[in-house]
Image (tube, rainbow, N blue to C red):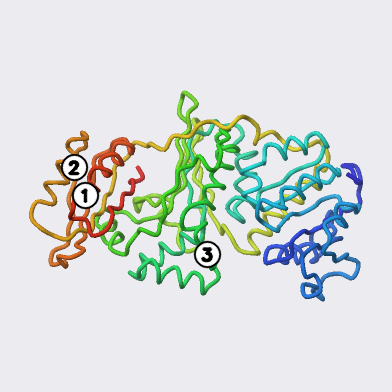
Amino acid sequence: MTSNAGDNAALSVALVGFGTVGRAVARILCNGAHRRLQLTHICNRGIARKKADWVPDGVTWTEDIDVVLGSDADIVVELIGGLEPATDWIRRALEAGKSVVTANKQVIAQGGAELAALARRHEVQLGFEAAVAGGIPIIHGLRQGLAGDRLFRVLAILNGTCNYILTRMEAGGVAFDAALREAQDLGYAEADPSADVDGQDAQAKLAILSAVGLRCPIAPESIPLHTITTVDAIDFVYARRLGCTIRQVSRAQRSADGRVCAGVQPMLVPRSSALARVNGSRNIVVVEGERGGETAFSGHGAGGDPTAVAVVSDLEAVAAAPAGGADNLLDGAAVPVAEAFESAHYVRFMVNDRPGIVAALAGVFARHGLNLDSVLQDPGGRKQQLAFVMTLDPCDSGIVNAALRDAAALDFHARPPLWMPVLA
């Protein structure tokens, strides 16, 4: 780096990406409160239409990443998103002796260990606080605040779009499609929301949390996913009767033998849980350690200003210790991931009603050694696409899914059954 820890001069910062988060970062850096940091470069496509008159005259605007990489900038902030060219640009910045701060969850989840090792070789820093849960200081909290404990479980709500949709479905009794359109109109959901609602966004974030918090690196693609698109407004009615709500839950747990169980899926969450009280687009991460018990981190998980706060916090951390290399929290070979958890289970059926349906399903569950806890059905429903729920005593989720594959062969289903674990 061109500066060192003993210098009093501000470190120069180059922003790569000037969208919602990039503009928010620039505004923070230009307000004069962070004297150890000086914005010197902004790189973005179509720079002529991006220029802002509130940015100081001395800042260099460019569309060429080589201008940034060849400059004397001490820190490069990557905010363009996506795997490429972001990974290549981060790698080249580190090789040029520049520290990097990124909000890119996919880059860190897929290649964070390699990039951190590269940062160590060049004695620069790699900051990625903003890659998980936006403005919640979860990476610093795990890396420093809970370093004295040995964590074994992570439970989290990591996607604000899904949380907004599910809480709107609950509060308004609206269908999934209507809640999604509202989220899109408000800017919470993309035109193509599949990465959010199908779980890939949370999947990458959970992989990072497993590596940093549990010290168990896992390949993001190995984390099983279940979409929230199959959740219906009627499920919130039955969840309420069971003292629960529904959330997209990301969870990872390290067992005593080093195995990791992980998944991202909609779950019934008891109303007494901290996860049930997180509404709208907010996020929460709850970690559990062998000595410290449960610790919860909650706040705004997305948006320009909260994410920019996380980015600038990383910049300040680099300014405090600009040399020495990144830590090894992302290192290690990826461990295998198992999906099966022991829990109670909720199964909602939508059937064309006739005598014998409950008995047939109970017979399937009995053949798999599963015990029914309850059967719930509101009276007076339509005989076509009639909804009812069976709950199962705590058991292995793999056995439940095997039973449901057998149950799917029965000819009375109007829609495929919806299975959700119940968070203990």
Q: Secondary structure at mark 2?
A: strand
Q: Work out which residue is located at the far left of the displayed protein and give it.
A: 355
Around disc 1, counting alpha carbons within 10 Å, would you say few (fewer than 14), some (14 to 19), or many (20 or more)?
some
Is residue 411 toward the left or the right of residue 134 in the image? left
- Residue 17: % across, % down: 74, 61
- Residue 297: % across, % down: 54, 49
Q: What residue sits right under mark 3 in the picture?
A: 192
Quarter of the image with the N terminus in it: top right
Residues marked 1 and 2 touching at CB (< 8 Å): yes
Q: Secondary structure at mark 3?
A: loop
Q: Amino acid at mark 3?
A: Asp
- Residue 185: % across, % down: 51, 74
Question: What is the number of the mark on residue 372?
Answer: 2
Q: Amino acid at mark 1?
A: Met
Distance between mark 1 and mark 2 Cα atoms: 7 Å
Q: Nearer the viewer, mark 1 or mark 3?
A: 3
Is residue 233 toward the left or the right of residue 322 in the image? left
Q: Secondary structure at mark 1?
A: strand
Q: Which residue is depicted at the point 74% across and 65% down?
A: 18
